[in-house]
Amino acid sequence: MARLAVLLACLCLAGCFYSDDPLIGRFQVDLPLEPGVYSHTPYDETGAPWPRPTWEGRIQRRGGRYVSDVPDFPHNAVRLREIADGTYAAMAMSESADGRTEYGYGLVFLYPGNIATYHNPDCSALSADDRSTWSITRDEEGFCKVESWASLEAALVLYLRDHGDNLRIDGVYRRIAD
């Protein structure tokens, strides 16, 4: 059941990198998106946006996280930390069946006008040598466990170096009102 929680986090934002402990702490966050009303439009597996937004609501900052009181906010309690100009590691939380909190990681790209896109990275796209160098272990289900911020940041930077020109967008948030 714990893997199910990680999988759900991966499907929502986090890709296949995960950790048992948070790698982006409250005092390490970056808060580049302004609070306001946003719409969320997911993209399908071919990279095409859905015909209309699937969620709309006010997003606020609370405790170093982005949160919303509007039900079904797809990325509630996400924390961001910049890894390159306008590019952020995103940490999402999920709860396992046994009540433990697990953390999944993805990429967020910020654009002018409070527009953010996100991508769920595929850790299997990293070479075995890169995973070994940064002590990232890949389990039998294809998920990659990271133990430190340095390892996660290095993995995401390598991933962007190798795949940045061909990243599929998995969704977009657009600020539509203050």
Image (spheres, rainbow, N blue to C red):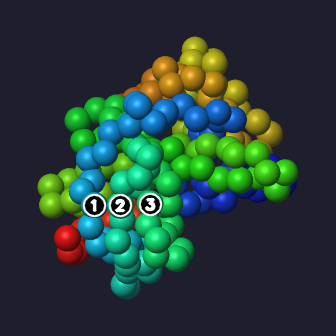
Q: Which mark is residue 118?
A: none
Asked whether residue 160 is in view, the answer is no
Where residue 161 sits: x, y (%)? 36, 31
19 relative to 69 in the view: left or right = right
Secondary-structure class at tag 1: loop
Secondary-structure class at tag 2: strand
Q: Which residue is mark 1?
A: 35
Q: Residue furthest front?
A: 63
Where residue 117 sits: x, y (%)? 34, 58
**Quadrant location of the C terminus in the rendered image:** bottom left
Give the spatial CA distance, label 1 vs label 3.
10 Å
**Quadrant location of the N terminus in the rendered image:** bottom right
Q: Residue at x 44, y 80 (%)?
A: 54
Disc 2 and disc 3 in contact, CB within 8 angstroms: yes
Label 1 amino acid?
A: Pro
Q: Residue at x 43, y 78 (%)?
A: 55
Label 2 amino acid?
A: Gln
Image vertical order of residue 29 relative to residue 171, above or below = above
Asked whether residue 30 is in view, the answer is yes
Q: Which residue is mark 2?
A: 60
Where residue 148 sits: x, y (%)? 57, 23
